[in-house]
Amino acid sequence: MITDADLDGISGWFYPPDPMLFRFFLELSEHRCGVADLAEIGCCFGKSSVLIGEYRRSGEEFTVVDLFEDPAPDPSNFTENRRDYGDLTESAFRANYARFHSSPPRILRMDSPAARPILAQRRYRFVHIDGSHLYRIVRDDIETARNILVDNGIVAMDDYRSEHTPGVAAAAWTAARDGLRIVALSPTKLYGTWGDPRPWRSALHTRLLDSGVSFQTQEIFDDEIIRVIG
């Protein structure tokens, strides 16, 4: 089993309580959704990818989409990538992943707009969006997730409330207004489904009580969502 200490040894950002929430959604989605794939749009050095890969089951594929060291076609995205992720390379990602898994994920070395038709060829139970911070791209990544997820599949979105990512916040809350049902919020990630959120919330409520992790419920768009406290 991959531990939080294992993840701490990989560069990148993946703060508590999100590893616990990833484990919860990945484990339960296997039972609620059946055999379906896993995907991550934007992987950085592989911190969350390593954990997602632990939950790939027989007959499933894990797909990672990232430009790595290639230049982004969008000038704004190119500037951000060079500033914040200039030392990210595919070889660094592969090396981190290979420390924990014998076979690599399917890697689509391209930007997410180019990857969309490839992703659309399969169906997924869990999609993690952590690529661009630009509103237009994140909005389209969310729509991609909506189209490729199986019924009751889960989308996780990073940076929905960070000070430096207002475009992600705008895209996330617009999606929630337009039909995405929020299951839970952590300090850095939003978890939602276009299916029925109530079984997810009920199971998560029980898991959090058992684990002793602090949480509260709040009403947003007439839904009672769970806010997990870091």
Image (cartoon, grey):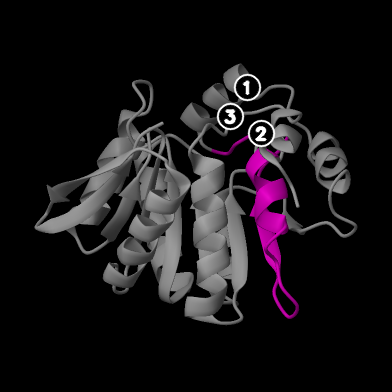
Q: Are marks 2 and 1 in contact (CB under 8 Å)?
A: yes
Spatial CA distance of label 2 from label 1 is 8 Å
Decide: marks 1, 3 in contact (CB < 8 A)? no
Mark 1 lies on a secondary structure that is helix
Q: Earlier in the sequence, mark 3 or mark 2?
A: 3
Pair 1/3: label in front: 3
Is 165 left, or right, of 132 in this rendering?
A: left
Label 2: how many residues lie within 10 Å, few (<14), some (14-19) or many (20+)? Answer: some
Q: Estimate how packed mark 3 is, as few (under 14), some (14 to 19) or many (20 or more) residues with alpha carbons within 10 Å.
A: some
Image coordinates for residue 39, horizontal then vertical, percent: 60, 60
Q: Could one spot residue 130 in this view of the protein?
A: no
State left or right for residue 20 relative to residue 172. right
Q: Tag on residue 162? A: none
**Which region is colored magenta?**
47-73
Marking on residue 13: 3
Residue found 59% across the figure and 47% down from its top:
111
- What residue does disc 1 label? 82
For disc 2, the marked residue is: 71
3 vs 2, front mark:
3
* Residue 187 % position (x, y): 37, 33
Q: Quadrant of residue 207?
A: bottom left
SS at mark 2 in the image: loop
Q: Name which of mark 1 and mark 3 comes first in the sequence.
A: 3
